[in-house]
Image (tube, helix red, strand yellow):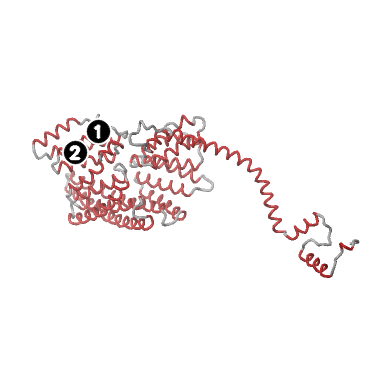
């Protein structure tokens, strides 16, 4: 520099600038321009600058994408606000204290709100379908599968407007509602819904493995209902492979499918038992001695195979119940289901062996009762008398007691399902209607005719208030059947007269 004050003041200043040069930093003796300093900065931080440029480029591209995403977000916000308004105004805002003396039940609010969805969203099939799907799933969640069917069926009309994931969920939910309402009486439609759900789940990018496995699980149940046990087992195995890989071996999702595979094994044994009874009836009707003996031989062979199958099923469900207790806890719903199936398999084997080996049948029935007692205590504490799981456990427990001749105890167990307060609050289910006849028989067998007839009349009144036609039909069938048996076995003229008077009041056309 010409100016003395801008030259290096000493050798150490020169040495310092040389170190700056070697380090790639700006020199004190260099021009003080921004370009020079920027060039030095870039050379010194090549990696960081390259990353910054990449980020800047991404942001630039992102601004373009953000404009589209903004429109999507605005649409999603509008949809969320519409659904929120529906929930606030039509679901919870519809409650009227004048109509609910003892508080508002969630199922009542959701059921009534579901009927308003088509009117609330008349021109938006996608949103209407999603709302109806949400209402249906909510009703399923609160234990009202029959009420869930209507909104889910309505949502099917908008199925084409839904996203693949929502379509799959809709098909699965409807299949579950139908199964829980009819007990799998329409497996053809159940299989159709499961296959549609499976196709929708597999059409997603990426595939929703949870939905795929759930669709396979429902398909297995429908195929079991159709009698295709091999196909059902394969569908369950495919679902299990997905769930174990996705959720883990100890997950509730995997436990459920393993339980369903156990049900296939149980159904194979029960099918053999039915075939054995059919062969025995064939033998009884045969007039040719050779044909009779051949039918009896088939019956014995199939009965033996059925007994072996039931024993294997009981062992399998015992293992499944222990594993579920370990992984999920003693009071988990699936643990209770597996323990119930274990006890039920013991009971079925007891009933199968009752005629040929009564001592073994007694042993099995005692084991079944011992298994049912703690289960019933848990479900009685947690579930209402109309809940399907409690009804199944109580019904099987009572049958095991009756199989041992402990009729009074069986009647006491069934009595808990017909709580007067519950009969006023909730509708009768078809399963309860069937058990009403069993309770009538037990009470009559104990000589408690007044109680038996009073129970029959109360059950029929309860059935008349039910919206489920299956409950009404089963109630009248159970009353008629029990009444016929009571008249047939009447021990005195007075008992016969009273049962005959009650039977005269029964009319199949007016349950």
Give the quadrant of residue 180. Answer: top left
- Kindly identify the residue that appears in the image at 77 percent across and 59 percent down: 40
Question: Where in the figure is residue 70, as x and y percent of width and height?
Answer: 61, 40
Image quarter of the N terminus = bottom right
281 or 503, nearer to the observer: 503
| For residue 448, side relative to residue 56 (left or right) | left
Question: Where in the figure is residue 389, as x and y percent of width and height?
Answer: 31, 46
Question: Where in the figure is residue 496, as x and y percent of width and height?
Answer: 11, 36
| Crowdedness near tag 1: few (<14), some (14–19) or many (≥20) residues, C-alpha within 10 Å | some
Which residue is most to the bottom?
A: 11
- Kindly identify the residue that appears in the image at 79 percent across and 67 percent down: 16
Give the quadrant of residue 321. Answer: bottom left
Q: Nearer the viewer, mark 1 or mark 2?
A: 1
Where residue 461 is drawn, which disc sits there?
Answer: 1
Q: Which residue is mark 2?
A: 482
**In this view, 36 is above or below 19:** above
* Figure disc tally: 2
Which residue is most to the front?
A: 5
- Kindly identify the residue that appears in the image at 27 percent across and 37 percent down: 423
Q: Name the element at disc 1.
A: helix
Disc 1/disc 2 C-alpha distance (Å): 17 Å
């Amino acid at each position: 520099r010409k100016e003395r004050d801008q030259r290096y003041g000493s050798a150490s200043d020169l040495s310092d600038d040389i170190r700056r040069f070697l380090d790639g930093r700006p020199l004190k003796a260099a021009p003080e321009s921004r370009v020079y300093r920027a060039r030095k900065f870039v050379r010194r931080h090549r990696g960081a600058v390259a990353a910054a440029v990449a980020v800047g480029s991404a942001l630039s591209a992102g601004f373009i994408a953000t404009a589209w995403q903004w429109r999507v977000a605005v649409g999603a916000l509008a949809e969320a606000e519409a659904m929120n308004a529906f929930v606030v105004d039509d679901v919870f805002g519809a409650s009227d204290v004048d109509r609910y003396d003892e508080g508002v039940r969630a199922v009542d609010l959701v059921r009534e709100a579901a009927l308003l969805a088509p009117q609330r969203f008349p021109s938006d099939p996608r949103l209407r379908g999603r709302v109806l799907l949400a209402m249906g799933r909510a009703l399923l969640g609160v234990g009202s599968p029959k009420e869930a069917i209507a909104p889910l069926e309505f949502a099917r009309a908008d199925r084409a407007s839904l996203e693949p994931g929502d379509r799959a969920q809709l098909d699965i939910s409807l299949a579950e509602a139908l199964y829980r309402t009819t007990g799998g009486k329409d497996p053809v439609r159940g299989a159709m819904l499961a296959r549609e759900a499976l196709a929708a789940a597999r059409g997603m990018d990426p595939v929703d493995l949870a939905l795929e496995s759930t669709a396979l699980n429902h398909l297995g149940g429908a195929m079991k209902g159709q009698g295709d046990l091999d196909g059902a087992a394969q569908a369950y195995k495919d679902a299990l492979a997905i769930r174990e890989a996705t959720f883990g071996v100890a997950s509730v999702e995997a436990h459920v499918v393993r339980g369903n595979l156990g049900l296939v094994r149980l159904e194979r044994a029960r099918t053999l038992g039915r075939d054995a009874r059919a062969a025995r009836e064939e033998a009884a009707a045969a007039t040719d001695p050779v044909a009779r003996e051949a039918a009896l031989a088939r019956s014995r062979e199939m009965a033996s195979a059925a007994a072996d199958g039931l024993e294997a099923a009981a062992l399998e469900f015992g293992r499944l119940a222990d594993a579920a207790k370990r992984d999920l806890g003693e009071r988990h719903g699936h643990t209770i289901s597996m323990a119930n199936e274990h006890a039920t398999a013991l009971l079925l084997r007891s009933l199968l062996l009752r005629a040929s080996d009564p001592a073994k049948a007694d042993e099995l029935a005692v084991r079944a009762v011992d298994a049912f007692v703690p289960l019933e205590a848990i479900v009685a504490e947690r579930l209402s008398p109309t809940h399907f799981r409690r009804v199944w456990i109580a019904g099987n427990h009572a049958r095991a007691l009756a199989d041992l001749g402990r009729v009074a105890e069986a009647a006491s167990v069934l009595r808990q399902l017909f709580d007067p307060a519950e009969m006023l609050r909730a509708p009768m289910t078809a399963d309860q209607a069937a058990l009403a006849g069993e309770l009538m028989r037990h009470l009559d067998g104990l000589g408690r005719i007044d109680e038996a007839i009073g129970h029959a009349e109360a059950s029929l009144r309860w059935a008349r208030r039910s919206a489920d036609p299956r409950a009404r039909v089963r109630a009248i069938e159970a009353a008629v059947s029990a009444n016929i048996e009571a008249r047939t076995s009447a021990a005195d003229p007075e008992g016969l007269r009273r049962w005959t008077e009650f039977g005269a009041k029964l009319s199949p056309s007016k349950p």
